């Protein structure tokens, strides 16, 4: 078993939560989302992000709007919908429980 495969699956599993968390603070276009993820050392490429954004949009968790740009083509800005806010609230709760459980197991003396 290769550790890289497990690490990739862990990042993939948490990416949706991270993207929704970013968008809970302000609307962003994909390049901004990628920058925020890079700052957190979660390296993601556009080929990973765009399908995720589409899936979240199709699930009615995100909406978007187009805005003209002086620096190139129009930009698509994403934001959470009401359903997205509720979904993120549930994910935050689950993350808290999981984080507590993992920390407990890591620190437990057997």
Image (cartoon, helix red, strand yellow):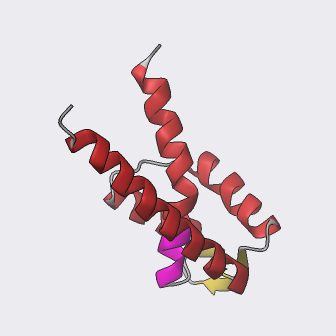
Q: Quadrant of residue 2?
A: top left
Magenta segment boundaries in residue numbering: 20-25
Q: Quadrant of residue 60?
A: bottom right
Q: Position of residue 85 (x, y in %)?
A: 62, 81
Q: Position of residue 62 (x, y in %)?
A: 70, 75
From where the camera sits, is residue 76 visible? no
Nearer to us in this view, 1 or 71: 1
Residue depicted at 44% across the width and 60% down the height: 97
45 versus 69 height, above or below: above
Residue depicted at 49% across the width and 25% down the height: 5
Q: Position of residue 35 (x, y in %)?
A: 41, 63
Magenta includes 60? no
19 versus 82 height, above or below: above
From where the camera sits, is residue 85 visible? yes
Left or right side of 39 for 74: right
Magenta includes 22? yes
């Amino acid at each position: 078993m290769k550790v890289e495969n497990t690490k990739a699956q862990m990042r993939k599993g948490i990416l949706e939560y991270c993207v929704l968390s970013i968008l809970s603070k302000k609307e962003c276009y994909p390049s901004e989302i990628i920058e925020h993820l890079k700052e957190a050392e979660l390296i993601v490429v556009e080929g990973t992000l765009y399908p995720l954004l589409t899936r979240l949009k199709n699930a009615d968790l995100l909406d978007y709007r187009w805005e003209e740009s002086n620096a190139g083509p129009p930009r698509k800005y994403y934001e959470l919908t009401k359903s997205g806010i509720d979904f993120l609230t549930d994910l935050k709760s689950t993350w808290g429980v999981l984080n507590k459980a993992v920390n407990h197991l890591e620190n437990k003396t057997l």
